[in-house]
Amino acid sequence: MKYPKLREVREAVTSLFTAPYTTKFPKEPHTPFEGFRGKPTVNDEKCVGCLTCSNVCPSYAITVEDDKERGIRKIVRDYGKCIFCGQCQNYCITGEGVILSDTDYDLSTFDRKDENTVETQEKELLLCENCGAVITTKEHIQFLHKKLGPKAYSSLIDLNALNDELKLSKPGETKTEVTEGLRRKDTFKVLCPNCLRKVLVNNLLPDE
Ligand code: SF4
Ligand code: SF4
């Protein structure tokens, strides 16, 4: 019990002759420590709109709206709700879509809707050609194809989706309607997992 008392006295005397630990921010600029977790900074070029960050965000600061009419996914990041935990950065599938800045941290504002506090991104959706369900974004599928390389062709889902990048034909030229009900040939169209399952099950277990 004696030692802690002596240690506290030594620390108190030392502190009389050392500079204060606290800074004078905002009166004077503050330089954060290395690895400081400041404002999440989005790199739209590297973000594919996959929603992983939205799913892991503990404070629901990242919300998503899919507009099937326009074929657009809107991602809204509200830094007024952000707790700077870094989960979005840790789990970002591209590793570069969002990174917490170690210099941008002063987010004080009188308007919680200003553009420094609420940021919006838009990504083009990939929709099922049979039922119109949202599969994911086109950038997400292209990212997965790049990552998987030739293995990606073991999936029948999206040769049409890839055309946006490969430019094998004019836009819309390869897109075909599912007109005769789901049949085996439709596995080569852009189908959501539900419709793809129906095609496969119908072909394995035909009615007649
Ligand atoms: S830092 Fe944490 S709270 Fe902030 S947006 Fe990312 S996951 Fe959400
Ligand atoms: S996890 Fe990364 S790539 Fe996916 S939406 Fe979030 S920032 Fe974009």
Image (cartoon, rainbow, N blue to C red):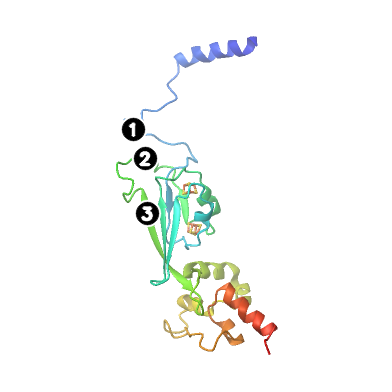
Residue under numbered circle 3: 119
> What's the CA distance linking mark 3 and mark 2?
16 Å
- The residue shown at (60%, 73%) is 152
**Residue pictured at 57% horizontal, 77% vertical:** 195
In three-dimensional space, the C-alpha distance between marks 2 and 1, rounded to whole angstroms, equals 9 Å
- Residue 164 at x, y = what percent? 45, 76
Residue at disc 2, secondary structure: loop
Tell me, yes or no, whether the two marked residues, 2 and 1, touch with CB atoms within 8 Å.
Answer: yes
Give me the residue at 36% from left, 42% from top.
Answer: 107
**Hey, what amino acid is under mark 1?**
Pro
Q: Position of residue 82 (x, y in %)?
A: 44, 45
Category of crowding for the residue at label 3, using alpha-carbon neighbours closer than 10 angstroms: few (below 14), some (14–19), many (at least 20): some
Query: Do we see residue 205 in this rendering?
Result: yes
Of the numbered discs 1 and 3, the one sitting upstream in the chain is 1
Q: Which residue is mark 1?
A: 26
Q: Distance of mark 1 from mark 3, alpha carbons?
A: 24 Å
Task: Please tell me which residue lies in front, 87 or 192.
Answer: 192
Labelled disc at residue 106: 2
Above or below, 97 relative to 40: below
Q: Amino acid at mark 2?
A: Asp
Image quadrant where residue 45 sits: bottom left
Residue 56 appears at what percent x and percent y?
54, 52
**191 relative position to 204: left or right:** left
